[in-house]
Image (spheres, rainbow, N blue to C red):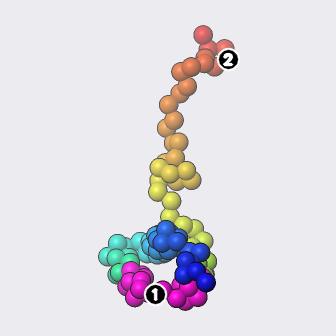
Amino acid sequence: MSSVTPYSPQHVASIYRRLLRLSLNWTVRRDIWRKQALEIRAKFDANKNITDAREIRDLIIEGERQLAINRHPDPYIPPSRPGGSKFERNVPPRLDKPIDGDY
């Protein structure tokens, strides 16, 4: 039997980053969010030395479940990202083709 788990460290790091972003969606103030980020980090650090594949699988499933349960209905989108309030607000005009009737 192999000791390799189907979950990579990159997958765990992805869950960690998504949990941080999710908590930032729910908390606007950075000082409060920082405390939550430290709590999330402490939970991950407490489980970093686990080697049992079943326990690792259960922890990853629990992390994914927490992401699904706590998903924000209206997540924060930075203003200049697609879907943000400033996205393509002042798009410069196209210079390659003239508009019909403008010569």
What residue occupies the far right of the structure in this picture? 100
Percent from the top left, x then y, of residue 80?
47, 49
Residue closer to the observer: 90 or 42: 42
As helix, strand or loop, the secondary structure at mark 2 comes to loop
Disc 2: CA contacts within 10 A as few (<14), some (14-19) or many (>=20): few
Q: Which residue is mark 2?
A: 100
Highlighted range, magenta: 40-63
The quadrant of the picture occupied by the C terminus is: top right
Q: Main secondary structure of the magenta part?
A: helix
Q: CA distance from mark 2 to mark 1?
A: 67 Å
Label of residue 50 in the image: 1
Considering only vertical position in the picture, is 94 above or below 90? above
- Residue 42 painted magenta: yes
Q: Is residue 31 left or right of residue 83?
A: left
As helix, strand or loop, the secondary structure at mark 1 comes to loop
Identified by mark 2, the residue type is: Asp
What residue sits 60% from the left and 71% below the top? 73
- Residue 55 painted magenta: yes
Quarter holding residue 40: bottom left
Residue closer to the observer: 94 or 38: 38
